Every structure is written in structure tokens, then in C-alpha cells.
Image (cartoon, helix red, strand yellow):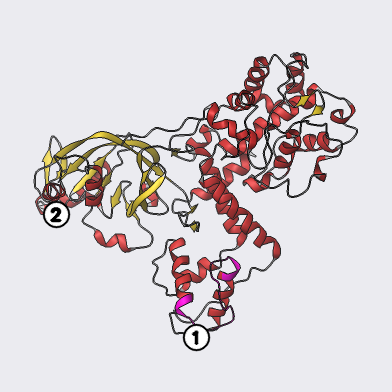
Amino acid sequence: MTSRITKITPSLVVLLGCIGWISCTRPGYQALEKPYPQVSPEIQHEKQAVAGNFSGQRVLKFDSTEITHFLTQYPTFNEYQNDIEKFYRKRDFTYAWYDQKGLIEQAGSLYNRIAHIHKEGITTPLPYADNFTAMMNDNDSLLHREPMNAQAELMLTSQYFSFARHVWQGAQQTDNDKMDWFLVRKKLNLEDLMDSLLLHPEKSLSTEEPVYRQYALLRAYLKKYSDLDSVGKWFAVRPSAKRLKVGDTDPTIADIRKRLDLTGDYVGDTSSLTYTPELMTAIKRFQESRGMSADGIVGPSVIEALNMTPSQIEKKIILNMERSRWVPVSMTGEYIVVNIPAFKLYVYDHDSVVWDMNVVTGQPMHETVVFNGDLKYVVFSPYWNVPQSIYQKEILPGMKRDPNYLTKHNMEMHNGTVRQKPGPNNSLGRVKFLFPNSYNIYLHDTPAKSLFSKDSRAFSHGCIRLGEPQKLAEYLLRNTSAWPKNKIAAAMKSTTEKWVTLDKPVPVFIAYFTAWVGRNGELHLRPDVYSRDERLSEMMIAKN
């Protein structure tokens, strides 16, 4: 039941050399004679490689002082100075983007990928993009006037590092801290990334980029909605005076049919004014993808969601592509993920969802923290040790109003603090799950079961309430012979607290994604319950 974060190793990132259609071993590289924008649109497809096989030659060199001269001229690239120096020191300052025949083909691939950086959800150009474009396009530039040029070589390498940092790594850790994002960050060593491409020049690989798989899935939807935004076919679905259900006839129904047809979520008659069972199936899928109760009834909330414009959806996708850059590329073993805006807990095994459940998360004034920890303990029939803040704001005023307040709420004084004894009305319910952390956040049962039927479930003081706590306890202890299901059920109904230590801790990740692609390939969108989308948007604009 253990899990390890997959490290970004050379064996993993060799793939960066050959993403897409270009072979790593294509022989006979020729110097490009025409400006790069003349490369066909097909070759500019987002699956195209950033760089394939770097030049394996070890004869043609440049003076190491050229690096200092280059960085003086382009100071924004100073953040990559160590990576650049390590990279060229290992290859004894030989050219990487040239061979004996001239500039290698992968230089054009890199240029095309950067020229279409918007497809990666990057809304502003990379540093010195104009200089790079001029270098690659101007027939009178040093790149074209000289057979080999150190400044052009270093511009290509610096642009490669810049692309990798912005597209595959995202914001720096300090920016995450400002966003209250304390989830483990993916480590991406840019110098190793470049160096690994040189270790396997004979291989031709076509595999994923070093980004969490959601990134590529969201990128495909970004293109879809960007295309919809550009063709001008989007329109507002007119509201109806009534809530629509199967059998109803209304002009709004034709609008809904056309809208769902436009996004590929419905195939059928787009002119009918009648709400048919076939349309209801599409409506239910849409409701699920927006976190609504899938009852098939079209009310104001459904119309509002349908009228979200392509540009609004694009923005949400871009922000969550950025979040996808921060998390580990993949995980092994079993682990648990809680997505706050989805109000869901997901149990994973080797990156596949085993099952999920509804959860209640913190109110906007008591935000659940984004972080990760290791679940180590299951506590049956727990005491609830009342936090000092709740004691001051709720318990103490209650005690002043009613001397019997503690007794009525099954509470007691214990070592100078108040705690609630185990029982059916205990605020933590019948079981809690602890992954020790400095935020005092954990998973637990609750007697307030009615909250799980609501679409938006931000009601707690920060901890995470579980819709199916017994199922999670049974899952975590399924391989522990001392804890069969009947014993778990009995322990949850006891009046005595019982701690169980897991044989192997299970990683828990508390995340915040307002857009993601589901297991069936559908785009899911959720309200920004903690207003973090706007904060991230402002940060990305400011940083760029």
C-alpha cells in the first residue's frame, strides 16, 4: 500500500527528445535554407517534438566566454546560467544544435513549438521571443550568414530551457506558497533534461512529456474551445419560464440541442422543441460534468452552465493546465486524492481510480489546505478534541448560557480542554483517519449526513467529512486479518475509542482543480469555491 513519487530521471525524460512524429535518428540533417514559418502546418502540430537528437559531434566547439557575453546581452536567461554552464561543460563546449552539415532539424521543431506557445496554455510570449523569431526568420541574421554561431547556439539552448520551465514545470515554488498550495511539487532538473537527450541518440521514442497526464488532456480541450471561440458559432441559450423535463415542449429545447451538438455532447435532431429521453441522457451527462445532481431536469443552473462562453472555459482550462505542471508526473501503489472543488475523494491504485465518494470540505472562511501527508491511523469511535477556536467562539458562549451545555452535547472537560465523547452524535462521527500534519486536517465521519446530497459541499471548519467512512475503513484494512468487516462495524458503534495503525501508510493528496478530464474523456468544470482561480490568473499575468 506504499507509494513513491516518480522522479524525473534521464530514462523518463529521454522522451523529450522525440515527442511526436520526428525520428531521433533521422540521418543526414541539413542546414535549413528557408525561414522556419514556411514549415507546413502539419509539422507545427502540438504533438511535434521540441527537439529530437541533439548533435552528437564533439569536434566543433565555441569559447566558454561566449556564455558570459550572451547572458550579459540577454539577462533574463540568467536564471538558467548554472544549467547552461553544466550542460556545455559536460560536452566540452561543443555545439549541440549544429553538426558538420549545419543547423540540425530540431532547431526548427523548437521554434515551431515556441511560436505556438498559446497551445500550451501560456498566454504571453517567452522572454526574447522577438529576438528568437528574428534570428530564425531573418535571412540576414548571424544564424544564416555564418555556418555556425555561438550566440545562436546559446539562444536555442536558453529558449529550450525557458520552454521546459514554463510548459513542463510551471510557476516556481515561492509562487505556490503565495497560492497556499503546499502539495508536493514535481522536480524538473533542466540540465539533466538536456543531458539525457545526448545519452541515447540511437533511440527513437514517442511517449508522454514530463507532465501529469491531465495536462495533455486539458490541452486537447483548450484547442477545441479555442476553435469554437474563433468560428463565432457560440450563442446564448434562451432561458425558459419553467423547469424542463422529458415530454415538455419549449423553444429553449432546440437551443439546448444545438448547444450540445456544437460541443459534441449530443448527436441527433437539433431542431426539435420536444424534450426526449435521448436528450435527457445528454443532459444528465452534462450535469455530471458540472458537478450537478444528474436528475435530467433543466433549470436555471443548467442554463447558466450551458451559457459559459468558450473564452471563460479556455481560461479555466489554462489555469488548471498550470496546476497540472506542479504535481508529480505519475504515482505508483495506492494513494488517496481529495479534490476540493469537486467535493470528492478518489482512491487510486497505480494512477487508476478504484472508487470515489462524496466529501464535505472547508467553508470559504475555513479553507481546507492544499497539501499532502501519509495516512497512518484509523481511529474508531473517536473522541473529538474541540479546537481552541471553536471552544472560544461556540462552546464557551454555550456554557455561559446553559450550565448543562457540556452534558447535553456528550462533552467533558479533559486535561483542561473540552472533548466530545464517542457516540452517534459525535462531531467526528464513528471513525476518523489521521495523516499527521501541521494543519490539523484529517478525514472523518459525520452525523450530518444530509449535507452529502447537496451539489456544493463546503461546510466544515477545514477537515474533510466522508460520505462513506465505513467503506474507506474496510478498504484500508481489507488485508488485515484482525479486522474483518463485522469487527469494523462493531468498533464504529462502540463507546470506547480504538486506534489502529496501518501496516503501511497510504499517501493522501489534498488538491484544488476546477477543470479536469474524466475517465470517459469528458471535460469537468467546477465553481471556484475558494476564489483561487482569479488569484492564480493574476499571478500568471504578473509573472509573465
Number of callouts in the render?
2
The location of residue 254, given as percent across then percent down, is 56, 79
User: Quick one: label 2, few (<14), some, or many (20+) residues within 10 Å?
Assistant: some
The location of residue 250, given as percent across then percent down, is 52, 84
Q: Horizontal placement of 37 versus 224: left or right? A: right
The location of residue 450, given as percent across then percent down, is 26, 62
Query: Cα distance, mark 1 to mark 2?
Result: 48 Å
Q: Nearer the viewer, residue 150 or 466?
A: 150
**Quadrant of the image occupied by residue 162:** top right
User: Quick one: label 1, few (<14), some, or many (20+) residues within 10 Å?
Assistant: some
Q: Quadrant of the N terminus?
A: top left
Reply yes or no: does residue 337 show up in magenta: no
Residue at x-position 48% and y-position 52%:
514
The residue range painted magenta reads 261-278
Residue at x-position 55% and y-position 72%:
267
Query: Which residue bears the numbered disc 2?
Result: 424
At label 1, the amino acid type is Thr
Q: Quadrant of the C terminus?
A: top right
Q: Which mark is residue 249?
A: 1
